[in-house]
Image (cartoon, coloured by chain):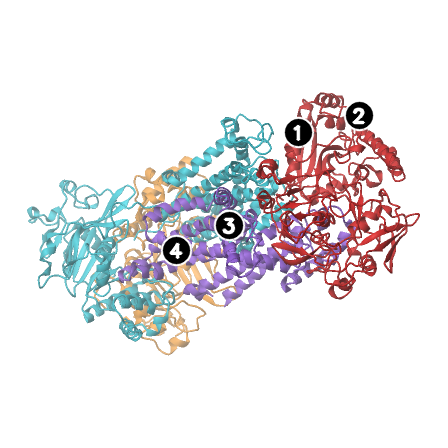
């Protein structure tokens, strides 16, 4: 219980730190949304009108910074994330995020979970068959793939599977614009088709880490007495591999999985950027480019909360899987 | 290096309940180091926990010049904590340590600290982790010399290092000094541990289970090194061990610890031939002595020694004690002198001879 | 921003910001009600009316998905509604001597001192929800801007001096505090008329500036049906007031996050109307099909702005500026920096060929600016005490993300080096750049005005009039180089009252000052990006028939283009 | 058995290990190449200013332009060459600074402890959790782009926390290492302990961390520049990518413009990753690739002894091991840990195998139980269990026998019990592996065996960590008795316990054995422990049995100098205090066993021929001893007395 409280305290503190950082960064940097918007309207609209407009869209730069901060914290917590004041002026931030979230969740979420599951499985097998073909070939290969830049893999895939094949696989956007969204086979097919290359990019760059760490954990665990004990008991290989070795080997990876979500988000920004995939990463990129404070802040908070939530879930998973952790809790 | 001058600063006529009894001729010698009511508690659990582990509780002991005192007990009895208190790794929660009559609490300044540390070095249990793997074997010895004998030049330090390495029975010294720890066997490393301590020209070496992780064939060699150090270098040794047989082999006096308390103390032979405390008796019966008969009280042996957390008054051994009486549950027994320089903390134990001083301890 | 500099290079031949009080000259300005002096007619007269049918797909990268907001008062959303759904009173063609096309007003009449204008509102126009359009809607629109200043994007009630707007019958009267002819373009062309029955009640009335307006009700040729983040589909307004129009029945406006895919769609003919930069356009687009065409008319200068303040010793020295102007090979900058897709500028400051009749070729060549002259540049510079051995160190600020400017500056840097100028390029974030440009914190700035006008006068005035400058540290408004020349200021004053020929003469006099003083160094000209495909769609604006600004992001011009387009297949 | 020494010595050993690693070599070669390129770009291209627009735009690859030219007319190859410097500088400087910060924060937190540790580790965790890349983008965007300093700062500020966490963990594990305590007891200052004692032992982690931070910096910086958040006029790979992307290099037929700098980033990243990985493997040798020589151990069919044929006779022993040899495939050739062992265990017999660490006793035991795993394998000999040769059996055949017919009790129950399963579940696993039992049957039997060893059956639902050491050990013994096997193999089951608990457990084992009648094969390093319990004693030295016989006889009249030495190494609590000698020297390195008698170098009664002749096991009355002094021709001569002192 105390352990859980401690964790909760940590989450709140981290969240607060992230939120504060988030509040301070744009405010202490040069430039203002007014000039950004001025450029966007090609100078047609007067600066005064723009400032007035931004005010009606909830932008109050002249307010006391302290009260801005308090109000900001309150708004963040209560879900009043405001209206976009960037390129998408006036659109509620929640709507923008709502539009982008499913795509990121679908693409990045699936790719991440798939990479974790697949990577863990391959890692388990590689570690189990120590010295086997899998074990000798995989590590160096995946050491290299896990160091590849996301965007470069993306570019390579685009070149090979899209440019050279004359557009066999789409390299842009989330689905074909000519299709009206709905649960039609054409639409679903198009969505899947558009997800192939970005998904593959994420998978290629992130799976290596899981394979390597899982293999290493397996090797460490396999040297443990209880695995030998499992053999001595005459348990089937499958049972030893999963219930005795993998079950223990996966424990250290859980927190890594949570942390890696942060990296996945980063990767997602680049991947979404390259593939023009209208997800959260792209949204953040745009928000940053357009000095869209409310959007930027909401997204940044969301990312932090996502990582924290993942950490929490992994904490719980660890509690569930590891009785020793339970004892500490 | 020799201990002729030991008596100079000693406090004659100590009133410690644990009498002194050297190997024959040391009856009234002054204490080199003594503790009075030494206590160390640890907070356990998380930040808000108020639970306290009583690792060392109210321990008073005396070590004389050129004396080997063995501190015997099971794991968790507090013997290692006691060693670390004496080595000034931990600060005591209560009580005091007097070295040559002077309380350590009054040591001020780095110089005085260093002086004590050079007089009372420590040898650690695990030979595999007590040498820094990043350095050659000579590192610790030379550092110690530089710290504690600043007068020595570079070459003199090296020569002295070779001397102490030879003194613990390692040869060729020059070559050994240039090796890395992983190139030495466990026994060799442990000898290096003693050599390090010896380099300071110590008065008292705190040896914390120095042989327990060594193979049987090598142990005796180390024990012999300890006795030789006493003979040739004139140092005292506090030998901490769970192995009563080895304690008997080297020690002049024996202290038995249980649950943070010293439960029995006295000259080694006296304690072993007539153990007063039931715990000492249990311990003795469990010793895997190839020549000893097989007998053990399975019931007492089966339960484990307790972690002494927030103890209530009463004898800490009572749960395992075959002789426990009502008083054991209410009153914490204190050390009573039950024979010449032989004391035990037990309500049931009886003296082998009436002693006028025995009444000093509450029954 | 990986987009090729688009946003600032956009043609916007409208009225300048509110602070600008230039008068707008327009032939036939005193025409009587109902009879506009010059109309381009509906469509190309030669072609006559066409049958309905066909779809046009626009490829214009926005860098975002659609928000499906169509509020004409929201600058982030109005490109997608103005012209398509909402219409102005009078359309003014900036590319064709300000030719006027009556839209919701059939005509107008100024009073003598031009402080009051009366519009005659067109009869028989219906909002696309079936409600009739009336003069009251017009008056409501203007009065809304008074009530909610955030909707008064052109500062009509504040800067232009609008006093009152009243409707009576089919007449709407706008009364001003002072002469308001220069604002005609703003209130007649740029302001879209909104329906009172929508904007007069509920959320729209409470927050007309921020209301999303997801289903815009306008008088225009198209309705939004439907809109998704990925695509806006416009369908023809069957009840449109111009009988038989629009010919095109459907417009697809997909969201593109990047030039690349939009360009791919254009090259493949999947999209017919492009409005963005295509790198290597010849190979990538024009050569792909004989039906692919491009016409990107230049309208504004991209210039080096030297800091003329005496505190900047080098750049305030005319010899240094002249040396730079002589040293730069503008054709090469245009060819490499802009990939040959923007024409080179010239030292006169007149954009060619758009404003050819104002250009004083003789003066330019007499001063030796007709071709690069590094020798003369080196000589001028050594006169000022600099040489390749003792180079003048200058920095130039530019906006990061505008890679064409970066490339142009790379060329310029290379060209200045041999004459003894060591140029450092500083890429700044847009906002940082703006601040430093406005307050004069730079040696040199590479920049193009975002707005100009239908004659060179507007841009020159913006850049050169001392009214538009400010001391260092204060925000200047167009005259960022801090040029002060009373003679030139006087010329700007005279322009408003001069006749056509006189105006040409005045512009040429200003040119002379620019050539002599070199307050700015025009390098290239920015253009209105436009690509079009004629496989099925015809009726596009062309150099021969520039009936509207051709890029899809111009309003209300986009509406004009859509009214001209037709499908060949449907005929 | 072997002591864990996770802390590695840096210096020569590290260097050697690195050179031996193919990954490290590959990484270092790439890195070196880039370093040369960064230092001397002129060696690789004749173009002086790579950003100069000197050539025709968009040329294809040719001998003049290896990779063609950009849309602006720059030579791509030259840009690549000149871009190396910035990427490398970013990687090295940011990597270095981040590592310094990691070490500073991580080690201070761990070593100084207390409130400072709480605060610092909180800081580490907060920074760790905040998504770095979005933060970098925001920071880079607003902190003024283009500046290398800003980029470096941003990378360092976001890049240190991961390393700091690792440093802290490592330093925490070091914190209570004896050599640090030794330094403190020596009187060293804290700063000295941290700098001179802690840091050197963390060298490989620090270097690995640097590589990781450098990798992170390279990738992040390239990503930022690719997004246009760098200086577009700088010469760097990321900037090239940015330009290429802007000019749609992929789509407009100059993919090399985009792919080549990306490949360089990938290569540089890979070089750091490879070296990092190599350091991982050095820190944890188990992770290194193993090469399987020949077939798997189970499949290898060593020559079956002729002894196997007479196995089926009526009073055949329960277990008969003949000529068993086990070798470990080491880096420098095989090491024979068991060098030809014969032993026989009869039904119900208690056989003890004693020897010092490294004598091969545990290996022997695992070889008998069929539990060897790579790199150890049986190379010769047979293990006949009730007449069947375990050595040649497949895993499947073995599984049929395991636990039902013979079970194993290991040294430390803490390690041998699966920490994430309850005791009951582990019992169930064992039972269900050998038949179908109902939940009730499983439970009933589990309760039965637990009660047998005197543990409350409620503990079936306990996890191993919830039991005390003695209870765990008993629970494991109980598990070994689930099927009442014929043979229980015990590997030092009491050595982790205190003397008192040790003694009582021995008593209990003996009681159970007498009650249930199973045979015990008991391995221990503590000879004195088995004195009263075992029927038969085998003394092992350097992979061989040096003496074997009835326990009592061996104790009373040891026939081998080593056995005698061992016995004399135990001081007694009774009888006169005599000075003991022990055995001098240390056991031989099994990779290079001594010529002749393996005990000769330590033997107090060694003779010249002992160094030439390898002794066999010679019968000496009831016992057999591997000593030339006991060879038949010397039988008449008694073992010379060891010089006794005082």
The answer as to whether the residues below labels 3 and 2 share one chain is no
What chain is the red one? C
Residue visible at 73% across and 64% down?
C203
Q: Colour of chain D?
A: cyan
Q: Marks 2 and 4: which is nearer the front?
A: 2
Q: Position of residue C28 (x, y in %)?
A: 86, 44
Relative to residue B294, is residue D207 depicted above or below? Answer: above
Instruction: Please tell me how crowded label 3 is: few (under 14), some (14-19), or many (20+) other residues with Cα within 10 Å.
Output: many
Say which of C124 and B184 sits in front.
Answer: C124
Q: Which residue is mark 1?
A: C332
Earlier in the chain: of badge 4 and badge 3, it is: 4
Quadrant (top left, top right, bottom left, bottom right) of the N terminus of chain C: top right
Dot 4: element: helix
- Residue B204 placement, left or right of C176: left
- Chain coloured purple in the rendered structure: A
Relative depth, front residue between C367 and C32? C32
Q: CA distance from mark 2 to mark 4?
A: 79 Å
Do marks 3 and 1 share a subunit? no
Hey, which quadrant is residue C433 in on the image?
top right
Residue C365 horizontal side relative to residue D26, left or right? right
Q: In this rendering, which labeled residue sits more in front, label 4 or label 3?
A: 3
Please name the residue that numbered disc 4 is placed on: A121
Mark 2 = which residue?
Answer: C362
Specify the chain shown as orange: B
The residue tagged 3 is A198
Q: Is residue D167 visible?
A: yes
Q: CA distance from mark 1 to mark 2?
A: 22 Å
- Res. B38 in view: no
Which quadrant holds residue A71?
Answer: bottom right
- Vertical placement of C23 versus A213: above or below? above
How many angstroms separate mark 3 from mark 1 (CA)? 39 Å
């Amino acid at each position: 219980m105390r352990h859980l409280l401690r964790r909760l305290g940590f989450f709140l503190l981290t969240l607060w730190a992230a939120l504060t950082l988030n509040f301070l960064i744009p405010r202490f940097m040069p430039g203002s949304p007014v000039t950004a918007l001025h450029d966007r309207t090609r100078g047609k609209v007067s600066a005064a009108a723009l400032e007035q407009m931004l005010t009606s869209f909830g932008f109050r730069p002249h307010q006391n910074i302290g009260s801005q901060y308090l109000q900001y914290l309150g708004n963040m917590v209560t879900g009043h994330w405001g209206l976009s004041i960037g390129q998408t002026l006036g659109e509620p931030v929640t709507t923008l995020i709502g539009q982008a979230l499913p795509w990121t969740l679908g693409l990045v979420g699936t790719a991440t979970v798939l990479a974790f599951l697949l990577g863990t499985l391959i890692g388990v097998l590689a570690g189990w068959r120590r010295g086997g073909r899998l074990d000798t070939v995989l590590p160096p290969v995946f050491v290299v793939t896990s160091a590849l830049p996301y965007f470069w893999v993306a570019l390579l895939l685009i070149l090979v599977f899209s440019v050279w094949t004359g557009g066999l696989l789409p390299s842009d956007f989330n689905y074909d614009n000519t299709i009206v969204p709905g649960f039609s086979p054409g639409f679903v097919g198009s969505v899947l088709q558009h997800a192939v290359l970005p998904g593959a990019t994420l998978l290629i760059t992130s799976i290596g880490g899981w394979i390597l760490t899982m293999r290493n954990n397996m090797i460490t665990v396999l040297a443990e007495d209880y695995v030998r004990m499992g053999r001595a008991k005459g348990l089937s290989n499958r049972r030893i591999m999963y219930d005795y070795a993998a079950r223990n080997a996966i424990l250290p990876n859980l927190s890594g999985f949570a942390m890696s979500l942060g990296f996945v988000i980063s990767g997602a920004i680049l991947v979404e950027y390259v593939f023009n995939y209208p997800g959260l990463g792209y949204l953040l990129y745009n928000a940053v480019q357009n000095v869209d404070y409310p959007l930027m802040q909401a997204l940044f908070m969301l990312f932090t909360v996502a990582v924290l939530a993942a950490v929490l879930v992994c904490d719980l998973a660890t509690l569930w899987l590891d009785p020793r952790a339970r004892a500490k809790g | 290096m020799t201990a002729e001058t030991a008596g100079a600063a000693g406090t004659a006529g100590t009133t410690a309940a644990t009498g002194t009894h050297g190997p024959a001729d040391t009856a009234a010698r002054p204490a080199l180091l003594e503790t009075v009511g030494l206590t160390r508690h640890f907070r356990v659990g998380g930040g808000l926990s108020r639970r306290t582990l009583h690792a060392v509780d109210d321990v008073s002991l005396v070590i004389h010049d050129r004396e080997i005192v063995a501190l015997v007990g099971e794991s968790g009895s507090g013997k290692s904590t006691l060693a670390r208190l004496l080595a000034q790794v931990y600060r005591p929660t209560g009580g005091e340590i007097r070295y040559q009559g002077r309380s350590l609490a009054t040591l001020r300044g780095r110089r005085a600290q260093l002086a004590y540390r050079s007089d009372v070095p420590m040898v650690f249990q695990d030979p595999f982790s007590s040498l820094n793997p990043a350095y050659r074997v000579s590192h610790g010895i030379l550092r110690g010399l530089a710290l504690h004998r600043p007068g020595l030049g570079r070459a003199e330090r090296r020569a002295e290092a070779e001397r102490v390495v030879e003194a613990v029975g390692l040869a060729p010294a020059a070559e050994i000094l240039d090796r890395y720890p992983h190139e030495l066997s466990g026994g060799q490393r442990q000898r290096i541990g003693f050599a390090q301590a010896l380099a300071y020209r110590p008065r008292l070496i705190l040896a914390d289970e120095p042989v327990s992780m060594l193979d049987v064939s090598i142990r005796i060699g180390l024990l012999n090194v300890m006795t030789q150090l006493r003979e040739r270098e004139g140092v005292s040794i506090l030998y901490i061990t769970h192995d009563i047989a080895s304690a008997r082999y080297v020690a002049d006096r024996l202290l038995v610890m249980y649950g943070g308390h010293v439960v029995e103390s006295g000259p080694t032979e006296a304690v072993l031939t007539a153990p007063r405390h039931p715990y000492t008796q249990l311990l003795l019966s469990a010793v895997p002595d190839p020549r000893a008969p097989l007998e053990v009280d399975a019931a007492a042996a089966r339960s484990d020694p307790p972690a002494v957390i927030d103890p209530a008054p009463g004898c800490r051994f009572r749960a395992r004690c075959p002789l426990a009486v009502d008083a054991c549950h209410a009153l914490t027994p204190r050390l009573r002198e039950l024979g010449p320089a032989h004391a035990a903390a037990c309500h049931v134990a009886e003296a082998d001879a009436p002693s006028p001083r025995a009444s000093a301890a509450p029954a | 921003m990986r987009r090729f500099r688009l946003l600032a290079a956009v043609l916007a031949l409208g009225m300048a910001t509110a602070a600008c009080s230039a008068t707008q000259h327009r032939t036939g300005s005193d025409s009587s009600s109902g009879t506009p002096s010059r109309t381009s007619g509906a469509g190309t007269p030669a072609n006559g009316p066409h049958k309905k049918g066909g779809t046009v797909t626009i490829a214009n990268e926005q860098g975002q998905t659609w928000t499906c907001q169509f509020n004409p008062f929201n600058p982030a959303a109005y490109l997608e509604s103005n012209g398509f759904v909402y219409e102005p009173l009078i359309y003014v063609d900036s590319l064709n001597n300000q030719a006027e096309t009556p839209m919701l007003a059939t005509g107008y009449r100024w009073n003598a001192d031009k402080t009051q204008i009366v519009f005659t509102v067109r009869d028989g126009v219906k909002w696309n929800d079936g409600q009739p359009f009336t003069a009251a809607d017009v008056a409501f629109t203007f009065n809304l801007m008074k009530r909610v200043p955030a909707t008064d994007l052109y500062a009509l009630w504040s800067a232009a001096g609008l006093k009152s707007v009243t409707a009576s019958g089919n007449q709407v009267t706008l009364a001003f505090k002072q002469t308001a002819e220069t604002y005609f373009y703003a209130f007649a062309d740029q302001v879209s008329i909104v329906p009172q029955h929508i904007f007069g009640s509920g959320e729209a009335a409470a927050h007309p500036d921020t209301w999303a307006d997801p289903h815009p009700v306008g008088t225009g040729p198209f309705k939004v049906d439907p809109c998704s983040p990925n695509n806006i589909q416009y369908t023809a307004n069957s009840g449109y007031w111009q009988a038989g129009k629009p010919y095109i029945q459907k417009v697809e406006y997909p969201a593109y996050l990047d030039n690349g895919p939009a360009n791919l769609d254009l090259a493949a003919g999947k999209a017919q109307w492009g409005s963005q930069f295509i790198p290597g356009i010849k190979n990538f687009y024009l050569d792909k099909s004989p039906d692919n065409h491009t016409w990107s008319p230049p309208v504004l200068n991209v210039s080096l702005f030297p800091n003329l303040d005496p505190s900047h010793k080098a750049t305030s020295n005319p010899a240094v500026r002249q040396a730079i102007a002589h040293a730069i090979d503008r054709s090469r900058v245009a060819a490499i920096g802009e990939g040959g897709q923007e024409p080179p500028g010239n030292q006169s400051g007149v954009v060619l060929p758009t404003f050819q009749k104002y250009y004083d070729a003789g003066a330019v060549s007499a001063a030796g600016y007709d071709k690069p002259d590094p020798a003369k540049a080196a000589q001028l510079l050594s006169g000022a005490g600099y040489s390749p051995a003792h180079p003048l160190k200058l920095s130039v600020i530019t906006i990061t993300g505008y890679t064409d400017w970066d490339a142009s500056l790379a060329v310029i840097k290379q060209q200045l080096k041999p004459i003894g100028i060591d140029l450092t390029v500083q890429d700044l974030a847009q906002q940082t750049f703006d601040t430093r440009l406005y307050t004069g914190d730079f040696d040199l700035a590479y920049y193009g005005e975002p707005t100009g006008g239908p004659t060179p006068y507007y841009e020159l005035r913006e850049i050169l009039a001392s009214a538009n400058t400010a001391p260092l540290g204060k925000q200047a408004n167009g005259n960022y180089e801090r040029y002060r020349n009373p003679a030139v200021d006087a010329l700007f004053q005279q322009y408003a009252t001069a006749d056509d020929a006189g105006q040409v003469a005045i512009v040429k006099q200003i040119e002379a000052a620019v050539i002599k003083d070199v307050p700015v160094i025009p390098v290239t000209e920015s253009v209105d990006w436009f690509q079009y495909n004629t496989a099925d769609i015809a009726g596009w604006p062309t150099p021969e028939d520039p009936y509207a600004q051709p890029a899809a992001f111009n309003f209300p011009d986009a509406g004009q283009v859509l009214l001209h387009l037709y499908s060949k297949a449907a005929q | 058995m072997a002591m864990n020494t996770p802390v590695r010595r840096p210096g020569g050993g590290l260097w050697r290990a690195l050179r031996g690693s193919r990954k490290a070599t590959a990484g270092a070669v790439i890195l070196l190449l880039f370093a040369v390129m960064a230092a001397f770009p002129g060696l690789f291209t004749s173009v002086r200013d790579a950003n100069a627009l000197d050539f025709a735009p968009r040329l294809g690859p040719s001998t003049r332009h290896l990779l063609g030219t950009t849309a602006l007319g720059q030579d791509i190859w030259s840009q690549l060459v000149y871009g190396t410097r910035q990427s490398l500088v970013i990687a090295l400087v940011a990597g270095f600074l981040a590592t310094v910060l990691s070490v500073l924060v991580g080690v201070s937190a761990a070593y100084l402890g207390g409130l400072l540790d709480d605060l610092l580790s909180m800081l580490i965790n907060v920074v760790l959790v905040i998504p770095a890349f979005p933060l970098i983008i925001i920071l880079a965007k607003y902190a003024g782009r283009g500046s290398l300093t800003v980029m470096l700062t941003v990378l360092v500020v976001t890049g240190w926390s991961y390393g700091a966490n690792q440093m802290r963990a490592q330093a925490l594990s070091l914190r209570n290492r004896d050599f640090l305590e030794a330094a403190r007891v020596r009187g060293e200052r804290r700063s000295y302990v941290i700098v001179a004692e802690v840091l050197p032992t963390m060298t490989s982690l620090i270097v690995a961390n640097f590589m990781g931070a450098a990798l992170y910096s390279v990738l992040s910086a390239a990503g930022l520049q690719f997004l246009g958040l760098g200086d577009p006029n700088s010469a760097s790979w990321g900037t090239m990518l940015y330009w290429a992307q802007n000019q749609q290099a992929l789509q407009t037929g100059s993919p090399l413009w985009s792919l080549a700098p990306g490949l360089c980033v990938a290569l540089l990243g890979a070089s750091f990753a490879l070296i990092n990985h190599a350091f991982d493997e050095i820190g944890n040798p188990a992770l290194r690739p193993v090469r399987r020589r020949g077939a798997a151990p189970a499949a290898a069919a060593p020559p079956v002894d002729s002894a196997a044929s007479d196995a089926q006779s009526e009073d055949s022993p329960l277990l008969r091991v003949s000529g068993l040899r086990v070798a470990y495939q080491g880096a420098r050739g095989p090491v024979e840990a068991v060098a030809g062992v014969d032993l026989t265990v009869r039904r119900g017999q208690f056989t003890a195998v004693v020897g010092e660490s490294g004598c091969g006793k545990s290996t022997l035991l695992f070889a008998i139980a069929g539990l060897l795993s790579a790199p150890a394998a049986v190379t010769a000999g047979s293990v006949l269990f009730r007449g069947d040769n375990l050595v040649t059996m497949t895993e499947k055949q073995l599984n049929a026998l395991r636990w039902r017919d013979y079970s194993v009790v290991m040294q430390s129950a803490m390690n041998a019990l699966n920490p994430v399963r309850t005791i009951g579940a582990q019992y169930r696993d064992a039972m269900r592996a050998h038949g179908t039992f109902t939940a009730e049957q499983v439970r009933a039997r589990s309760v039965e065996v637990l009660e047998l060893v005197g543990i409350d059956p409620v503990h079936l639902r306990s996890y191993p960590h919830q039991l005390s050491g003695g209870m765990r050990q008993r629970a494991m013994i109980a598990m070994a008795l689930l099927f009442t096997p014929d043979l229980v193999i015990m590997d030092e089951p009491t050595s982790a316990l205190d003397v008192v608990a040790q003694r009582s457990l021995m008593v209990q084992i003996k009681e159970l054995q007498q009650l249930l009648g199973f045979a015990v094969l008991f391995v221990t390093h503590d000879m004195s422990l088995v004195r009263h319990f075992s029927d038969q004693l085998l003394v092992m030295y350097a992979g061989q049995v040096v003496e074997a016989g009835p326990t009592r006889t061996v104790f009373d009249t040891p026939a081998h100098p080593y056995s005698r030495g061992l016995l004399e190494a135990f001081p007694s609590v009774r009888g006169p205090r005599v000075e003991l000698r022990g055995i001098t020297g240390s056991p031989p390195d099994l990779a290079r066993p001594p010529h002749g008698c393996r005990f000769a170098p330590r033997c107090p009664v060694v003779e010249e021929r002992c160094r030439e002749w390898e002794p066999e096991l010679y019968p000496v009355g009831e016992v057999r001893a591997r000593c030339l002094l006991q060879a038949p021709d010397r039988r008449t001569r008694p073992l010379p007395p060891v010089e006794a002192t005082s």
